Amino acid sequence: MDLRQQVLRTDVAGMPLEWVGYRDAVRLYFLGQVAYSCGSLLYRIHGGINARTRRRSVIEVNSIIATYGESHTLTRMRRGYTPPLSNQTLFQRDGHLCLYCGQHFHDADLSRDHVRPLSQGGPDSWNNVVTACVRCNNYKAGRTPEAAGMQLLAIPFTPTHAEYVYLQGRHVRADQMAFLRAHFPRTSPLRERLNLCQ
């Protein structure tokens, strides 16, 4: 049993919300906040022994749990919510691929490149940033790809909330991936990339 494996938490309607660790998942089960669970069994957590019944408590945690309560995610999405941009999720969005030279790199060798440079008024937003290796980013410098004679391999895009939840995941299991992909737009570049990886 790998206690580092994350649990996908959704609202009652099945909208992906976030990843939680086993402690938070057990707490949600204990507090009666889990409406239903699906996916595979991840953990079987044993508690203490009841003094009266002499029975030991056991909580089984599945890979996907739907929880009761208000979902602020849907409200945020209706208001034009944009997921926060971080290098970790950007590199994951672009598959750890430099979108100029096309090679795969480790995080330490990657950087955030602004397609339209900040010095030229380009925004620090999902639709203007791509993953670039340090070498390509240094070569491009404060120029646009066209001015630097470089070609982008893919067009940057803003992930939906479900895509963003996927991008934040570590060691996403097959059942969790299938659940999340059902929430990706049909025209999602991320869906297309994941289809190619299968």
Image (cartoon, rainbow, N blue to C red):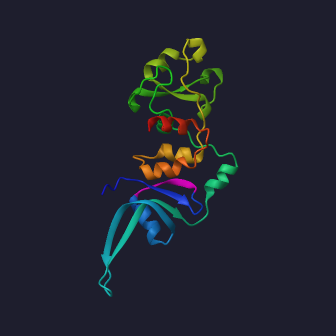
Q: Looking at the picture, tell me which residue is in the foreground, 173 or 21.
A: 173
In terms of secondary structure, what is the magenta stretch mainly? strand
Q: Which residues are magenta?
A: 15-21
Q: Is residue 145 left or right of residue 43?
A: right
Task: Identify the residue at horizontal 63%, vertical 29% (top origin).
Answer: 123
In this rendering, is residue 4 above or below 50?
above
Residue at image point 62% right, 43% down = 82
| Image: 1 above or below 81 | below
Inspect the magenta stretch and tell me whether residue 84 lies in it.
no
Whole-percent x, y for residue 58 in the image: 35, 72
Q: Is residue 125 visible?
A: no
Q: Is residue 198 above or below residue 120?
A: below
**On the rendered image, what quadrant is the N terminus found in?**
bottom left
Q: Quadrant of residue 130?
A: top right
Residue 17 belongs to magenta span? yes
Q: Residue furthest right?
A: 79
Q: Which residue is at a point 32% across and 72% down the rendered structure image?
A: 47
Q: Position of residue 61 (x, y in %)?
A: 40, 64
Residue 10, image x, y percentages? 54, 58
